[in-house]
Image: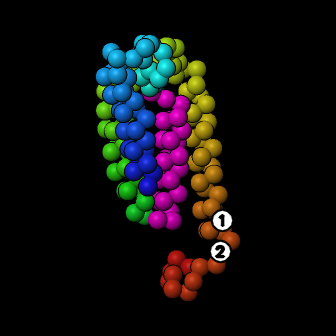
């Protein structure tokens, strides 16, 4: 559902907005490209947080659901191409340049916190939960 909603929101918010601005600009009272609604910006911070969330799903899925990392990897590959298409066709660059060096440590810290949060349920399951007798030698 995350893939479907992300693709739909990209098409509706970015692509349809850009089509409206591009073709309705000639018959509008004001300049739609410079004013409201304008072309959409590519939200770098929002997309990075989405990637951090998906990375946490992959880490949790490696222990609890082995098929989840494969599904999430396919989803991320599809999203890369959808977002790159949206950037090339419907978005404009931001007025201020995104300085990755300023926030790089923040995103690394966020990934580290997500890794620790993902190890808590795994540690709880390994230490406190009693395994069934069907586990054999791994009991």
Is residue 52 depicted above or below 36 in this figure?
below
What x and y, as percent, mark residue 65? Answer: 46, 65
Q: Is residue 56 magenta?
A: yes
Quadrant for the C terminus in the image: bottom right
What x and y, as percent, mark residue 106? Answer: 61, 31
Q: Quadrant of residue 76?
A: top left
Give the residue at mark 2: 129
Give the residue at mark 1: 124
For marks 2 and 1 on the same chain, the one whose residue lies earlier in the sequence: 1
The front one of 48 and 109 is 48
User: Mark number for residue 102?
Assistant: none
Is residue 93 depicted above or below 114 in this figure?
above
Q: Quadrant of residue 11?
A: top left
What whole-number distance in Å separates the C-alpha atoms at marks 2 and 1? 7 Å
Q: Give the left or right position of residue 19, taking residue 56 as reference.
A: left
| Circle 1 residues within 10 Å: few <14, some 14–19, many ≥20 | few
What x and y, as percent, mark residue 9? Answer: 43, 41
Q: Main secondary structure of the magenta part?
A: helix
Discs 2, 1 touching: Cβ within 8 Å: yes
Q: Give the left or right position of residue 87, taking residue 45 as reference.
A: left
Is residue 62 visible in this depiction of the protein? yes
| Magenta highlight range | 42-65
Q: Is residue 62 magenta?
A: yes
Is residue 93 visible in this depiction of the protein? no
Q: How is the image coloured?
A: rainbow
Q: Residue at x 48, y 35 (%)?
A: 47
């Amino acid at each position: 559902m995350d893939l479907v909603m992300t693709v739909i929101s990209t098409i509706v918010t970015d692509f349809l907005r850009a089509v409206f601005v591009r073709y309705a600009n000639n018959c509008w009272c004001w300049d739609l490209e410079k004013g409201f609604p304008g072309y959409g910006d590519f939200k770098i911070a929002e997309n990075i947080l989405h990637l951090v969330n998906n990375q946490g799903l992959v880490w949790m899925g490696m222990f609890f659901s082995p098929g989840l990392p494969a599904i999430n990897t396919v989803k991320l590959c599809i999203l890369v191409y959808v977002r790159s298409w949206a950037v090339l066709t419907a978005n404009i660059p931001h007025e201020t340049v995104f300085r990755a060096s300023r926030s790089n440590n923040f995103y690394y810290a966020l990934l580290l916190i997500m890794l620790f949060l993902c190890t808590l349920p795994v540690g709880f399951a390994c230490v406190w939960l009693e395994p069934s007798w069907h586990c054999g030698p791994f009991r």
